[in-house]
Amino acid sequence: MYKNINAIFLIILIILFNINTIIYAQSENKQMIIVLDAGHGGKDSGAIGRRGQEKNIVLAISLKLGKLIEENLKDVKVIYTRKTDVFIELDKRAEIANKNKADLFISIHANSNKKTKPFGAETYVMGLHKTQENLNVAKRENSVIVFEEDYSKKYEGYDPKSSESYIIFSLMQNAYLEQSLSFASFVQGEIKNSAKRNDRGVKQAGFLVLWNTTMPSVLIETGFISNKKEEDYLLSKQGVDAISKCIYNALCEYIISIKNKTVAETTNFIVNNKNAEDNSKDTVLFKIQISSSSKQIPLNSNHFKGCKSVEEFKVSESSYKYTVGCDTDFKNIKKMQKSIKQHFPDAFIVAFKNGKKIPINEAIKK
Ligand SMILES: [Zn+2]
């Protein structure tokens, strides 16, 4: 008897899910906007290899990727930060994405190391670096601001040499971390499984180019120009085609995952879609609570002492909590808390999973 009831319930679930998929597909014809940012350009050549320059490699990948999207995904509009060999300032790149209200920002780069051995691809999202190696990548990419006039004024006194500067800086982009991580995981999955390249993983570090973007954003280090074999690969048509295809496939998976997530939310059922593999689903996110109030406080209020990227978490009609920072790593959020405490002495760490607050002890265990 119970078995029958379960079976009927399951059928109802499946019907509901399919109906919602159809409704969703019909209502969601809104065009998605993707900004493709080929790193460097013009007087800034980026990393230099034996035969090639980063600026040319990443432009070739960006153009090929854009072509794939334009030819195959009719509902996606592509905007390029550059299509030729021109110099573009880092803040200008984010501005292009923000002005166009983009849904995703993809910055494409090639890596370089003093040693010739390292090879493989890695994808970064904005956050606090966990290793010196990750920090070095961000420092190298950020160092191109010296090509810009007035850079110290423009980047609010940001000092690439000071680690304190990186801690404060990594608090800036957090609202889209979960989606950025999700897309980054799809990229690395494709690098490993489709292109059969060395997958160096999804990482976090403070990149100036991602700093002011107001949408999910990633920076892909497609491979090491400092490694002879990999440089040859990145300079070959086969390499450019394969890497572009990986990012294109990741984009398709990402779009499917967003659609499935919306369906799951509208039906209030958790749908486990194995094809979509939503890697961000079980991610625990740590944030720092700086304030709570019985009334809603505007996010630009003096109450937050000029702190950027304050997020509101509504508990009920008469209970609002305010957080800053966001990281998947407890050690990192601890570091951030220390510097936030200088302005908000009572600041404490809270944890979220699937958008819901969970006990901190449980979160640390995970
Ligand atoms: Zn670069």
Image: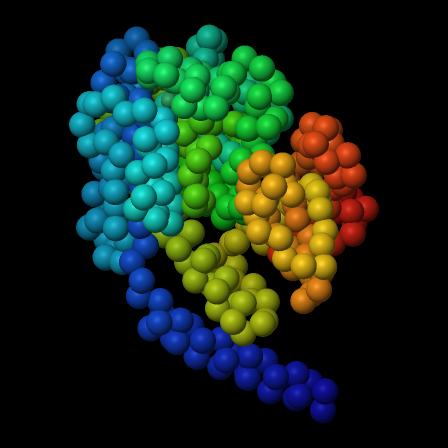
Q: Quadrant of residue 12?
A: bottom right
Residue at 63 percent of width and 57 percent of height:
296
Q: Residue at x 31, y 50 (%)?
A: 33
Location of the C terminus by quadrant is top right
Residue lying furthest right: 361
Would you say residue 1 is visible in this rendering? yes
Q: Is residue 10 above or below residue 166?
A: below
Residue sitting at 51 percent across and 16 percent down?
Answer: 160
Foreground: 231 or 320? 320
Q: Colour scheme in the image?
A: rainbow
Number of marks present in the image shown = 0
Q: Is residue 119 visible?
A: no
Residue 216 position by quadrant: top left
Residue for point 54% across, 35% down:
172
What percent of the width, then of the height, locates residue 59? 25, 28
In the image, 140 versus 94, the foreground residue is: 94
> Which of 217 and 345 lies nearest the eye of the viewer?
345
Residue 304 location (% of width, % of height): 63, 41
Q: Is residue 94 left or right of residue 82?
A: right
Asked if residue 311 is positioned above or below residue 232 in the image, the reply reads below
Task: Quadrant for the N terminus, please.
Answer: bottom right
Q: Position of residue 249 (x, y in %)?
A: 36, 47
Q: Quadrant of ligand 1?
A: top left
